[in-house]
Each structure stands twice: as structure tokens, then as C-alpha cells.
Image (cartoon, grey):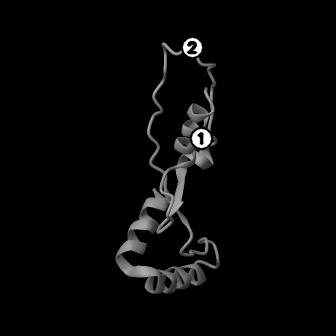
Amino acid sequence: MSLSTASLSHAIFGSWLQGGVTGALRKLSGNRIPLWNPYLPTAARCRKPKADAGSERPRVVYFPSCASRTMGPARGDPEQDALPVKTAALLRKAGF
């Protein structure tokens, strides 16, 4: 929820205002609030990979970490697919 909120406010306010507001909030909190920067990840949107039940290809069980399931690409990153989606595509390409 925090990553979604930070991403939404970044889209509304822009980098300059977002940095100023979050910097002031961090200072007021005694540095308890994390420092915001424009490369902060967005919330991940992971799709459930399709299973090939009838396939003769070797099967793999992939357990992504909670960090890779929750953190998506940064705003403006040219690659917008989440890591688990990319990993599943790579495994399919490799024949699994």
C-alpha cells in the first residue's frame, strides 16, 4: 500500500514537489520516514503464470520472495514487467 501511495503522489505532484514534501516529513519525523527518491519501486502487479498441465516439458516450482512479489519497476522504467513474470517467461523460453 505504501508503494502504491508513493507512486500515486509522485504521479500527481512530480519529482520536485514529491522530494520536497517527503524530505520535510522525514525531517519532522526525526528521520523515521524513509528517504524518497524517484527510483523508488512501484507496487508490483503480478499475473498468475499459466500452467502447461499437458506438456511433456520438465516442470519447475518457482517461489518468488516477498520482495520480488511486492516491488515492481520504478516509475518511468522502460521494463514494466514484474520480476516473477519475467522469470516465468525465461523458464518457458528455456523449455520448462
- Residue at which label 1 appears: 87
Q: Which mark is residue 26?
A: none
- Residue at which label 2 appears: 56
Residue 9 picture location, percent across and down: 40, 72
Q: Residues within 10 Å of mark 2 (few under 14, many from 20)?
A: few
Above or below residue 77? Residue 70 is: above
Direction from residue 37 to residue 50 in the image, left or right: left
> In the image, what residue occupies the spot 49% across and 15% down?
53
| Sequence-earlier tag: 2 or 1 | 2
Tell me the quadrant of the picture where the N terminus can be found: bottom left
Mark 2 lies on a secondary structure that is loop
Residue 41 picture location, percent across and down: 54, 62
Quarter of the view holding residue 59: top right
> In the image, what residue occupies the spot 63% across and 24% down?
60
> In the image, what residue occupies the spot 51% across and 82% down?
19
Above or below residue 40? Residue 84 is: above
Residue 74 picture location, percent across and down: 52, 64
Tell me the quadrant of the picture where the C terminus can be found: top right
Quarter of the view holding residue 37: bottom right
Q: Disc 2 residue type?
A: Glu
Direction from residue 32 to residue 1 in the image, left or right: left
Q: Residues within 10 Å of mark 1 (few under 14, many from 20)?
A: some
Above or below residue 81? Residue 32 is: below
